[in-house]
Image (cartoon, rainbow, N blue to C red):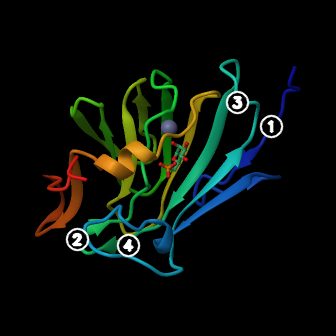
Amino acid sequence: MLDPFTRVINVASGDIAPDSRLVQRRLSDMKGAYAADCDGAEMVYEVFNIDVAQTNSELQTCTTRLYNGRVGNEYYMTKGHFHEVRDRSEVYLTTSGHGRLVMATEDGRYVVEEMRPGSMNYIPGGWAHRSVNVGDEPLVFFAAYIGDAGHDYGTIEDWGFPVLVVEGASGPEVVPNPRYRRT
Ligand code: M6P
Ligand code: ZN
């Protein structure tokens, strides 16, 4: 059995003290995610993980700091994933910045929700999820999900999401993804 513990989250930056496991994604890690080519060492996002046993009796928790920027007209975003165990759910709480949460089912339905400080987004089982930073500062959010969920990145790498969030003439626009399921 796990002993209780406390961590302190910097809600502006997403940093977790005293310790966390850091995952960093740079432009070079995002090849294929955008319509335009991308490469290089520039940081796109960082995930600070609090590791617990990956069982369905524990909750995995983490913060994500998604930087602002664009590749072509597409905003910086996370890779996005289904859960390997498809019916596992997740919640997000945004603490800083401004984003969109793109969610999609395997049969092609999609929902796009706002992410602003104080927004709690509930991601039911079966919905893939990707966060997009549409603001001009880092988007920071806390996430909690069922411990044995796992990350299936391959399905999204193959299919993409049904829609993209792009910079339009007067701000962010949700447009159909011309590459959806065309691999
Ligand atoms: C959220 C959670 C994490 C996820 C992270 C980055 O914090 O959903 O599980 O790892 O976003 O998203 P991705 O794994 O799709 O790159
Ligand atoms: Zn998830």
Mark 1 within 8 Å of ligand 1, using the beta carbon: no
Q: Looking at the image, is mark 2 or mark 3 nearer the viewer?
A: 3
Relative to 49, is 146 above or below?
above
Q: CA distance from mark 1 to mark 2?
A: 40 Å
Q: Which residue is mark 3?
A: 54
> What amino acid type should be assigned to the residue bearing mark 3?
Gln
User: Secondary structure beneath disc 3?
Assistant: loop
> What amino acid type should be assigned to the residue bearing mark 4?
Gly
Instruction: Determine crowd level at label 1: few under 14, some 14-19, many 20+ residues with C-alpha closer than 10 A.
Output: few
Instruction: Point out which mark residue 6 bears.
Output: 1
Foreground of the two, 11 or 181: 181
* Residue 24 found in image quarter: bottom right
Res. 100 in view: no
User: Secondary structure beneath disc 2?
Assistant: loop
Mark 2 or mark 3: name the one nearer the start of the chain: 3
Q: Name which residue lies at 30% across and 31% down.
A: 105
